Image: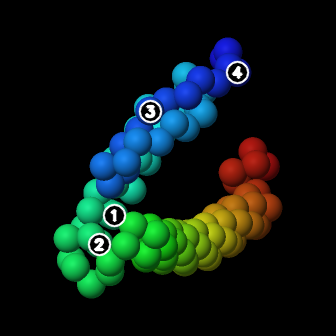
Amino acid sequence: MSGTTSPVKVMILDKEYLISCSDEERDQLRTAVDLLNDKMLEMKNAGSVIGTERIAVMTALNITHELLDYKQKNQDYTSRIDITLKRLQGKINNALVRESQLDIEDPISQGG
């Protein structure tokens, strides 16, 4: 990893911006720019918001809402997985305890 950064030209709503970025992050930056530009164009073409600054703010709010929604769904999913894993771990532990008790109660299996 070089750690060096260089300016990258990007276009958002027909305006050019120079963004300092490392070579390793360049593809991810371009993907982010494409998504942002698409979302801003959607907002602009909807016609309900006028002005680049307002379009940017409304787009940022929409993207933030999507991110928070995703995080909440991910947290809910993770929580359900944790509960399921704990339940399964309990069943495994109970089965191991029963198996251990059967070994102790059955002298034939112990060679006696």
Hey, which quadrant is residue 102 in on the image? bottom right
Badge 2 or badge 4: first in the primary sequence: 4
Disc 4 residue type (three-letter): Gly
What residue is rendered at 26% in x and 62% in y? 41
Q: Verify CB contact (< 8 Å) between mark 3 and mark 4.
A: no
Disc 2 residue type (three-letter): Met
Q: Nearer the viewer, mark 4 or mark 1?
A: 1
Hey, which quadrant is residue 45 in on the image? bottom left
Hey, which quadrant is residue 51 in on the image? bottom left
Mark number, residue 43 = 2
Location of the N terminus by quadrant is top right
- For marks 3 and 1, give the CA distance: 18 Å
Disc 3 residue type (three-letter): Lys
Q: Position of residue 88 (x, y in %)?
A: 59, 69
Residue receiving disc 1: 40
Q: Verify CB contact (< 8 Å) between mark 3 and mark 2.
A: no
Q: Position of residue 62 (x, y in %)?
A: 42, 75
